[in-house]
Amino acid sequence: MGQTLTEKILDDHLVEGELTPGEEIGIEIDQVLTQDTTGTMVWLQFEAMGLDEVQTEIAAQYCDHQTYQFDFKNTDDHRFLRSAAGTYGAHFSRPGNGICHNVHRENFAAPGKTMLGSDSHTPTPGGLGELAIGAGGIDVTVAMGGAPYYIEMPEVVNVRLEGELPEWATAKDVILELLRRLSVKGGVGKILEYTGPGVETLSAPERMTITNMGTELGATSSLFPTDENTREYLEKVDRGEEFVELQPDPDAEYDDEIVVDLSDLEPLIAQPSMPDNVVPVREVAGQDVDQVIIGSCTNGAFEDVLPAAKMLEGNTVNKTTEMIVAPGSKQASEMLARKGWVAELMAAGVNFSEATCGACIGIGHVPASDSVSLRTFNRNFEGRSGIEDDNVYLCSPEVATAAAIEGEIVDPRDLEDVADPGFELPERYDGSKADLITPEEAPDDELIKGPNIGDVPLKDPLDADIDGPALLKMGDNITTDHIIPATQDILMYRSNIDKLSEFTLSRVDDTFADRAAAAEGGWLVAGENYGQGSSREHAAMCPMYLGIEGVLAQSFARIHRANLFNFGLVPLLIDEETYERIDQGDDVAVVDDVHEAVSSGQEEFTIRVNDEWEATATLEASERERDMLTAGGKLAWTKQQAQEGDDNTARADD
């Protein structure tokens, strides 16, 4: 039996386990990336482990979220990150150089490589044939130190593309169509592998728009084969020698198949406030629009902004609408400027932003109250834009520009005197590399820590007893933005867990942090898909810091589940009936000796509520994950493993 492309890459990097869905595997990691809101903890944990130098082929530190540097805390973080990159041997991308995924694809992403990144949209280079996975910061730290990355082998789903995109339909509509069909939970535990004759009709950047937003499906990763379109892109970024032809075997067997006929697609739009709330644009046409933003890591490249510029030739932005271009990289801005498009866009009434994640996480360009914002971003979770009661739609650059011209949502096929601009790649990507500092150019060789940079919090080893109140009961699809908001007033404390923890779950219940600290232990209770969204490990770290000992949920998002293990919080699965019966404030105790039960491999646990009734909760965990829980988290466990290795070496020497 032949192999899928996913299996081929995993097989080449496999160090432990078998490629059977649901089985834990360990894989070698070639590249890692981290950004400024997750990177400080990555490097503090690297330091805490006593590691001396990065062991992966490529390690890259990007400063892309807090580029506006509102006060010294942000700037101190960036100085620390530059010093960490120089001290340990990573590339450093300066603030303003661009979003990690865009800059990484321009400079480092390569076919056949594996990558781990402390950002959930790390799978973006899957459009170039790189198997990239988002993870928590501590996972990136350990991989950067040379250890394997462990994950349950996902199912591999064949997304077969047929036909060719018609006028005004785009790659953004491909992934919106999949979200419409599958929902934000449809990709959990899966890698989406794209095949079929429709693949060759899509350029590498179009493919990367699709793999970027595969994260919104909950997918572990998304992957395209490589071909002449891949080679063409790599040559345009002066890395043609890195091309490798990668295809699945003709007789490869997949766990499932989804067929998308590109010819049937039309302009689509995700309504507030979930990426899967997708309808054809024509169904919401006529809705007034106050703000339009083109950009982000999904649609912020040169070739994403160019269609907007072409559409605005001879037109201006409607007087009722504000339009912003937020480039994905400084290179995109520079190329647009050199070709005269920045001036043309500005003359049409467009405002240019720095190349940053900012607006996507509510930092800058926050919408007005009771307004509608159309964005080419990947997420529209309620409140993520920086205002709680927002109305954010997700769409292609073409749909966004059409709305900017008309002042309302309009199917671009109905525009008068505006032709489909098409999708055009530049002859070459020739932006400056001045803001990307190589390890050899590093100006620092020791860590520089400002007063806002704290220590890495550690949890005690797992106790025999877990007994405490259900401190907060939540519904389905609670995101990491709910758990630790990403707005600038909160984000600046990412290096200071003592302060950051004060904002834990404040968007759900602003009394939670105080109540949790006073309770000195307790539970979180949630419905389906708890922890969806970003990879931020702070969403597990801060509850742990406040004394939370475990989470009872109907299901967990992949990265957040891993982060709960990484920080010693017990993730127990409960059924719908148990979820419905537990009330906030109830006392919940695990009847079993938790330490012994976790260590011995026990899967079913008995929980007792208010000493009145009992239910069964399930722990699905590998032996390695159980060892981490009992040790108090991955940092403690990794240091323990290293010490045992040193002791064994010493005994052997004796």
Image (spheres, rainbow, N blue to C red):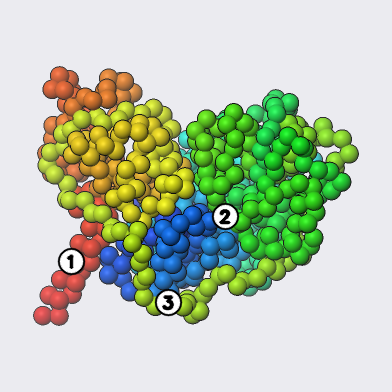
Quote the CA–CA distance across marks 2 and 1. 43 Å
Quote the CA–CA distance across marks 3 and 1. 33 Å
Q: Quadrant of the C terminus?
A: bottom left
Q: Secondary structure at mark 1?
A: helix
Q: Quadrant of residue 42?
A: bottom left
At a point 49% along the width and 70% down the height, the residue shown is 91
Q: Secondary structure at mark 3?
A: loop
- In the image shown, does 200 or 30 lie closer to the viewer? 30
At a point 39% along the width and 78% down the height, the residue shown is 445
Reply above or below: 213 against 552.
Answer: below
At a point 20% along the width and 62% down the height, the residue shown is 640
Q: Quadrant of residue 370?
A: top right
Circle 3: is it few (<14), some (14-19), or many (20+) Cα within 10 Å?
A: some
Is 329 displayed left or right of 187 in the figure? Answer: right
Percent of width and height locating residue 130: 54, 59
Percent of width and height locating residue 104: 56, 62
Quote the CA–CA distance across marks 2 and 3. 24 Å
* Amino acid type of the residue that numbered disc 2 sits on in the rendered structure: Thr
* Amino acid type of the residue that numbered disc 3 sits on in the rendered structure: Asp
Is 120 displayed left or right of 609 in the figure? Answer: right
Q: Mark on residue 356?
A: 2
Q: Secondary structure at mark 2?
A: loop
Q: Mark on residue 644?
A: 1
In the picture of the structure, the residue carrying the numbered disc 3 is: 444
Tell which circle, 2 or 3, labels the residue nearer the N-terminal end. Answer: 2
Percent of width and height locating residue 397: 70, 44
- In the image shown, does 178 or 172 lie closer to the viewer? 172
- Residue 247 in view here: no
- Marks 2, 1: nearer the viewer: 2
Circle 1: is it few (<14), some (14-19), or many (20+) Cα within 10 Å?
A: few
